[in-house]
Image (cartoon, rainbow, N blue to C red):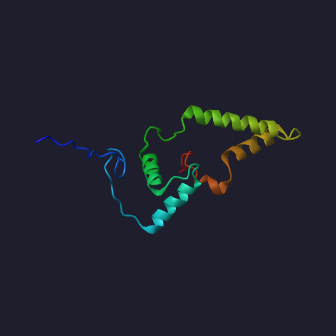
Amino acid sequence: MKKSINDNRKIGRGRPATGTAPLVGVRMTEELQDEIKAWAKKQEDKPPLAAAIRRLVELGLDTTKPPAQTTAKTADKAKDLAGDAINHMADKSASADEKASRKRRLISGPEEFRSVRVDRPKKK
């Protein structure tokens, strides 16, 4: 007996492969989902929920950028720039002592905010 020809090959049936990444199921409250959806709406490309969750996780895990820290050199430069700006705006008719006093008050900031400044050491 002659062999029959098998003509039943699968040709593109079913859902296409989605990649090799395993599926991870996560339970989350509706409130959290609503927050994620609101964040996604603010994005330019308006990603769907799954893509928004992946992007937020990637952003949360991104440790390539170290937290910004103020160095002494940067602080000194900022202080000099602030002093130059204050000198430029200073009242020309005031005495040198009055100008210096005003400049010190402006650089140190209002009294009510001095206690919450983290860049200045606490006075004893």
Please indicate whether residue 21 sits to the left or right of residue 56 in the image.
Answer: left
Image point 36% across, 63% down: which residue? 27
- Residue farthest to the bottom, as pictured: 30
Q: Nearer the viewer, residue 100 or 48?
A: 48
Image point 33% across, 54% down: which residue? 24
Please indicate whether residue 45 sits to the left or right of residue 87 in the image.
Answer: left
Please indicate whether residue 88 sits to the left or right of residue 3 in the image.
Answer: right
Q: How many marks?
A: 0
- Quadrant for the N terminus, please: top left
x, y percent for residue 8:
26, 47
x, y percent for residue 99:
79, 40
Task: Check the image and report above or below for 83 versus 33.
Answer: above
- Residue farthest to the front, as pictured: 1
Q: Nearer the viewer, residue 6 or 13?
A: 6
Image point 44% across, 43% down: which residue? 62
x, y percent for residue 21:
33, 46
Image point 51% across, 62% down: which residue? 35
- Residue farthest to the right, as pictured: 93
Q: Nearer the viewer, residue 85 or 53?
A: 53
x, y percent for residue 55:
46, 49
Task: Check the image and report above or below for 75 versus 15.
Answer: above
Q: Nearer the viewer, residue 40 or 106?
A: 40
Task: Check the image and report above or below for 100 versus 33.
Answer: above
